[in-house]
Image (cartoon, rainbow, N blue to C red):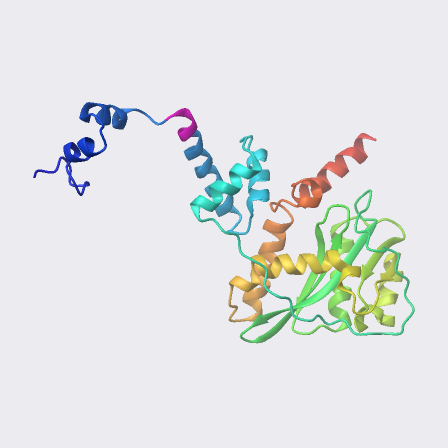
Amino acid sequence: MRLDTAEYAYPVTFMCRLLNVSRSGYYEWRSRPDSATAQRREHLKAVIGKAFELSNGTYGHRRVHAQLQRWDVRARPELVRRLMRLMGLVPCQARPRRRGLTRPDATVVPDLVGRDFTAPAPGQKLVGDITYIPTMEGWLYLATVIDCCTKEVIGYAMGDHYRTPLITRAIRNAARNRKLADQAIFHSDRGSNYLSDEYASVLAELGLWRSAGQSGSCFDNAMAESFFGVLKNELVSRTTYPTREAARQDITRYIEFWYNRRRLHSALGYRPPCEAHAEHEKAAIAA
């Protein structure tokens, strides 16, 4: 029997007769254009794919939906989730976090934050922590300072050690990059460096109040811990660094050009930190 086209395993005439469908009706159906709904779904899939690609495969359906809204593309979150599943778009997943560098310490430093990681304006409440990044040369240590209002990483420093000068350099960078309020709060865990006299003198020099959570409680510094979780999930866990310098450059790009400027933050109504900072500055000037 002759096949009508090479793509069929059986002749069209045979299949139409078996399914009780007219051959002319079948060809009419094939020649019809896609419905408006089908065309919209294909457009949505293309835009969803673009948003997912721009996030380097890190966005789940909620952030993809937020990005679509920023592009004035309307779609329900459930539809975005369903289409992402059909397209096989799965965001990278967090790995279990290793124990940090926090050590119990009897030094009396009050907790001025109380797990409230919000602030009415930039530069009033900051959190910081230190983590380590594996490279083939050994650990690269990263100290950060994050603004609780805008969620922006306003200061950071990296080196091959986690001694006090590394974290003092991070806070000095933060004071250089952003205007800090008088008697702003800087909150950390009770790592020995954050409780040292050397670090206390730097905070006093900058006019900052020192705050620390309880020993061994990651929830008391959850905002700083959360940033490290995101960094390692979206970047570090997917990369093998041959040198500390390669890791330093990659992390700098991530913070400066992705996390601060483009990554949508759920606590900011799915806006980037730099956008939130600019809006506060604009409101302050208008006032």
Task: Judge left or right: residue 270 versus residue 39.
Answer: right
The front one of 45 and 154 is 45
Task: Judge left or right: residue 79 versus residue 108.
Answer: left
Q: Is residue 173 visible?
A: no
Q: Bounds of the magenta span?
A: 35-39
267 w.r.t. 171: above or below? above
Residue 204 is covered by the magenta coloring: no
Residue in the picture at 71% in, 41% down = 276
Identify the image quadrant of residue 215. Answer: bottom right
Q: Main secondary structure of the magenta part?
A: helix
Question: Which quarter shows the C terminus?
Answer: top right
Task: Judge left or right: residue 87 versus residue 266.
Answer: left
Number of callouts: 0
Question: Which quarter shows the N terminus?
Answer: top left
126 w.r.t. 143: above or below? above
Residue 124: image location, x then y, percent: 83, 49
Task: Judge left or right: residue 61 versus residue 223.
Answer: left
Residue 7: image location, x then y, percent: 19, 41
193 w.r.t. 154: above or below? below
Residue in the picture at 18% in, 43% down = 9
Residue in the picture at 52% in, 62% down = 238
Residue in the picture at 46% in, 43% down = 49
Q: Is residue 132 visible?
A: yes
Identify the image quadrant of residue 100. Answer: bottom right
Residue 203: image location, x then y, percent: 86, 61
Residue 267: image location, x then y, percent: 71, 45
Most distant residue in the left direction: 1
